[in-house]
């Protein structure tokens, strides 16, 4: 996937998240892109690291910055105390439309996962994406995923950790969008 | 520094921060070859060709970053500035000895954060390092390898990996795991909103270039910085899911606005100045021909042998030796015979084609031979900094929602095309007659 296609994917996701009712802030977008890359086993061009409480991509952060600088994406301030949402500009919408010809932006499973994630808040998205990260990293290592998840996210109790891991497993196995 | 027992035995006078003091142990690092090399690396690459005063070096910037990092650390770790919530998230703050130790580590990391810079700083980066290597990676290597003997002399001993972590930050050190506390400390140095690297270079570059736009009230800003939990990301965010981050008290929000405006103007006036950018391109062209295999070395010992002095002497020599490598590019640098700005994408042009300069470059290349043209493309999303703000009632809110200014700072998008003076007139005339056709959108462009 080239840089332009990666940008088109990001713009398309912001639009899709907004249309499905997501707050669509930068953190929502970070976690959604990570979950999609892992669940679909498909790279949109963004490497993620475990950063404090969840997977995070500095490359995605830079891409968002470029999209803002090129007036394809805009910041939408929210009433205090909330952090801003992202929204497509008219140019951003045209950019997506033009890249629909070359990029596969209408994958059915991708849309189904976005629909599932769109009504989740940041706390839930962080929990799910971190659970996926833990499962990917602990695969075959013998570590206890629930304990590892609670180490990274100390707010979680054992039941919440197990629930997040169960959903993460199902998602990675393609059993649910 | 909180609970500080360090004795600052040495001092130097700095034009930006007054006296900068340091310990005998820090002096061992300061007197090492990697640090002393920074006396011969220009902070602003070829910007002195446009702003003659901008000849300051990475050495004094590194001292400035150490000084500001210390001031920020002292404010952030002052017990009066910490909330119970932050103490819970960052238990390190309750152990005075550990805080003191981290303070020492932070100062050394700040001092060392630029060790991997190539000759002429950023100008010569990019394609001049072997694939997959960045100057930040070189910084890590130098701290670990070239300074190894120096670290063994430091008492009390230091944790070298911690110094690397704080100096690089998680973006440039992706293989390392950062605790929330380590992330905060690295943010003090390299953070997007309030990193002291940025604060120092704005103040220092502004001073030396003679361009006043880089000034802001850094005293008040630093005094009002706080470690805060992030503002809620959505209306359902009831738990403290967000990482702690650097934020500030609402009363000083205008100083953050001033910092980000200063950054905007400095990028417009200096860092993205079109003539400075073409000199950087000529320098890069020279280095590609002058360096063996067209790349800078990546071994620390080889890297440390090269400074602006060696490269500058080679440019001077090559400028007057027609058969020498890089002669043509060196001549342009020395004799001020740079390619001329022939096109700068206006907003209207960018609305037709996002990469308008690329279209112009390709069209001119087809018409007049591509070797006669160069392009500089840079961008910066200026107004998107979102950081937590502590309100008077003790709650935390997003800076974007609190400030009428931040969101309105426009992005910067620079897209310039330059022509060899020999074809400039013809190319200008051709472009004036054909620009509309050149900018007709391709199907993959937005409009």
Image: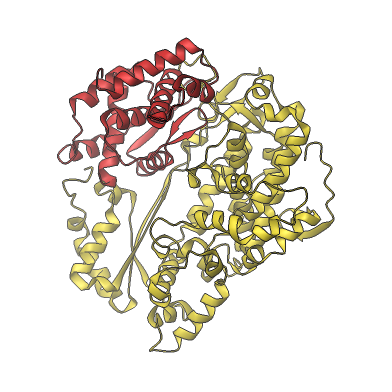
Chain colours: A red, B yellow
Q: Position of residue B83 (x, y in %)?
A: 69, 22
Q: Residue furthest top?
A: A159
Q: Position of residue B115 (x, y in %)?
A: 59, 59
**Vertical relation: A109 (above or below) B164:** above
The one nearer the camera, B343 or B365, is B365
Q: Write the residue at 73% across / 48% down.
A: B157
In the rendered image, is residue B25 in sight? yes
Is B435 displayed left or right of B421 in the figure? left
In the rendered image, is residue A120 in sight? no
Q: Position of residue B312 (x, y in %)?
A: 53, 77
**Vertical relation: A21 (above or below) B35:** above
Q: Write the residue at 65% across / 19% down.
A: B394
Is A108 displayed left or right of B234 in the figure? left
Q: Write the residue at 36% across / 16% down.
A: A166
Q: Position of residue B174 (x, y in %)?
A: 47, 43
The one nearer the camera, A163 or B379, is A163
Quadrant of residue A27 in the image?
top left
């Amino acid at each position: 996937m080239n840089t332009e296609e990666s940008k088109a994917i990001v713009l398309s996701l912001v639009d899709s998240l907004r249309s499905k009712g997501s707050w669509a802030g930068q953190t929502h977008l970070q976690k959604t892109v990570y979950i999609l890359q892992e669940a679909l086993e498909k790279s949109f061009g963004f490497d993620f690291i475990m950063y404090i409480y969840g997977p995070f991509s500095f490359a995605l952060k830079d891409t968002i910055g470029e999209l803002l600088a090129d007036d394809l994406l805009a910041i939408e301030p929210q009433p205090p105390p909330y952090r801003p949402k992202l929204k497509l500009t008219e140019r951003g919408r045209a950019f997506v439309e033009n890249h629909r010809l070359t990029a596969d932006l209408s994958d059915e499973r991708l849309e189904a996962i976005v629909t599932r994630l769109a009504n989740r808040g940041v706390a839930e998205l962080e929990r799910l994406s971190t659970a996926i990260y833990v499962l990917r990293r602990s695969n075959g290592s013998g570590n206890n995923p629930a304990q590892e998840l609670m180490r990274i996210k100390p707010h979680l109790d054992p039941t919440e950790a197990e629930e997040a891991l169960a959903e993460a497993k199902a998602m990675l196995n393609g059993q649910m969008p | 520094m909180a609970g500080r027992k360090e004795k600052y035995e040495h001092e130097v006078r700095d034009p930006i921060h007054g006296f900068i003091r340091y310990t005998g142990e820090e002096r061992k690092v300061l007197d090492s070859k990697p640090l002393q090399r920074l006396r011969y690396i220009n902070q602003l690459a070829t910007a002195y060709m446009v702003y003659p005063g901008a000849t300051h070096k990475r050495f004094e910037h590194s001292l400035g970053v150490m000084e500001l990092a210390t001031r920020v650390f002292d404010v952030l770790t002052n017990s009066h500035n910490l909330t119970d919530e932050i103490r819970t998230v960052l238990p390190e703050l309750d152990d005075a000895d550990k805080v003191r130790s981290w303070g020492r580590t932070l100062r050394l990391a700040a001092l060392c954060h630029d060790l991997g810079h190539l000759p002429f700083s950023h100008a010569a980066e990019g394609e001049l390092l072997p694939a997959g290597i960045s100057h930040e990676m070189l910084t890590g290597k130098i701290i670990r390898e070239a300074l190894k003997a120096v670290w063994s002399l430091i008492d009390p001993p230091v944790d070298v990996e911690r110094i690397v972590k704080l100096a690089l930050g998680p973006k440039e050190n992706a293989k390392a795991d950062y605790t929330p506390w380590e992330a905060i400390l690295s943010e003090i140095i390299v953070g997007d909103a309030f990193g002291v690297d940025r604060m120092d270079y704005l103040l220092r570059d502004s001073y030396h270039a003679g361009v006043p736009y880089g000034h802001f009230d850094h005293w008040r800003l630093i005094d009002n910085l706080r470690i805060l939990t992030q503002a809620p990301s959505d209306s359902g965010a009831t738990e403290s899911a967000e990482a702690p981050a650097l934020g500030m008290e609402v009363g000083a929000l205008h100083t953050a606005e001033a910092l980000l405006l200063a950054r905007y103007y400095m990028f417009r006036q200096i860092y993205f100045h079109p003539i400075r950018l073409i000199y950087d391109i000529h320098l890069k062209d020279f280095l590609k021909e002058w360096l063996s295999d067209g790349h800078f070395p990546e071994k620390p010992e080889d890297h440390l042998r090269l400074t602006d002095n060696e490269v500058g002497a080679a440019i001077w020599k090559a400028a007057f030796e027609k058969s020498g490598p890089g002669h043509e590019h060196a001549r342009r640098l020395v004799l001020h015979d740079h390619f001329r700005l022939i096109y700068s994408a206006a907003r209207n042009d960018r609305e037709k084609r996002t990469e308008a300069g690329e279209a112009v470059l390709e069209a001119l290349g087809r018409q007049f031979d591509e070797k006669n043209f160069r392009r500089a493309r840079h961008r910066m999303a200026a107004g998107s900094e979102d950081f937590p703000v502590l309100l008077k009632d003790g709650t935390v809110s997003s800076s974007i929602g609190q400030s009428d200014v931040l969101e309105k700072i426009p992005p910067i998008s620079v897209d310039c095309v330059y022509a060899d003076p020999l074809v400039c007139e013809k190319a200008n005339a051709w472009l004036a007659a054909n620009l509309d056709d050149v900018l007709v959108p391709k199907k993959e462009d937005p409009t």
